[in-house]
Amino acid sequence: MHTKWAAKAAVQKLISLLPDPQRANYLFQDRVTRSTTLKRTAYEQRLRWAGDHLAALRRLSPDRATSFAAVELGSGWYPIVPLCLFLGGADRVWMLDLEDLGRDELAAQAVDALVASADDGGLTEAIGPVADERIDRLRAAGTAIADRGRQSALGELGIRARPGDARTFDDEPDPALICSNTVLEHIEPTILSGILGRFRDLAGPGTVMSHLVDHCDHYAYVDPGLSVYHFLRYSDRTWSWIDNSIQPMNRLRASEYRAIYKRLGIEVTEEHLSGADGSDLLGERLAERFRRMDPDDVACTSSWLVTRFG
């Protein structure tokens, strides 16, 4: 029996009931699990994500890939992707989250990691050409965080946090790039439809929207013996008791995201799927909702949806 995931689920459920759950969650991660230090694997993962978004913009809308404006949904703790977008040519980057989850020490870790990658050549390999002037500004941002704090330092790079409901975002009409990384799976479907509809309304001709979705049970990342399909065994009612507001999981499969796009009139220009092999479900217990679906769809572990508007 696997208990590690259940313990984490119970702790997150408890934290989600506290008055300021995100602050409580950070303190728990910082002082109990000691997991607020940027891990190399997490950093390299985000570097690849940023490279994929920039490559999509350059491939599908090359005329808009310089001196552009970008929006990232769900930037989280470490502003690695926004910093990469700046390095890749963005003049303005908006970080959208319900709350501003950033902290000076976390931003400093992100800057230090990127400076190190610039020095060893790994940065350009991951995200493409970077102007020396942007590297110099990144280095200066590291000093500025210590002197004046992350908001001022990142603001000088054109990177700004915009806490609040993304469905009301209107600060950047016609951005060149809209992106997210393993965020959509944490958003309730009705709210998700509203957010994607807002992005559709903001987009102009040539805007590229690029979303990476993780369809796996995220508890499998802390409990190695757990199947990535584990959470699909529960009915919606049971899952609602297990799920929490700190790291909710909507359990939508790839086809259900495509259906949302279709209802909103958003075309999918490119779709890249991983793990879409129904044979991987052999031996898995599935709730009735998922048993009725195409096994290849249920088995899909990640999808990357890219849209070029107009």
Image (cartoon, grey):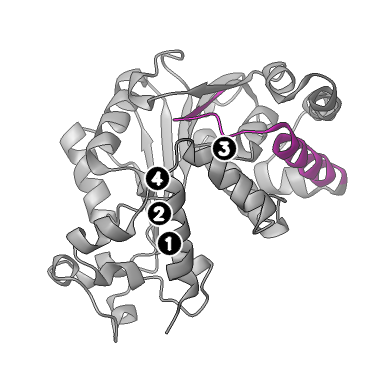
* Residue type (three-letter) at the residue carrying disc 3: Leu
State the residue in front, 182 or 250. Answer: 250
Nearest to N terminus: mark 3 or mark 1? 1
Residue position marked by numbered label 4 in the rendering: 17
Residue 53 in the image: above or below residue 169: below
Q: Residues within 10 Å of mark 2 (few under 14, many from 20)?
A: many
Please identify, in this view, whether the residue under mark 3 or under mark 4 is nearer the observer.
Answer: 4
- Dividing the picture into quarters, in which one does residue 188 lie? top left
Q: CA distance from mark 2 to mark 3?
A: 36 Å
Query: Residue 51: x percent and y percent?
Result: 60, 44
Nearest to N terminus: mark 2 or mark 3? 2
Q: Which mark is residue 54?
A: 3
Q: CA distance from mark 2 to mark 1?
A: 6 Å
Label 4, secondary structure: give it. loop
Residue 62 in the image: above or below residue 306: above
* Pointers 2 and 4 in contact (C-beta within 8 Å): yes
Residue position marked by numbered label 1 in the rendering: 9
Residue position marked by numbered label 2 in the rendering: 13
* Residue type (three-letter) at the residue carrying disc 4: Leu
- The span picked out in magenta is 94-119
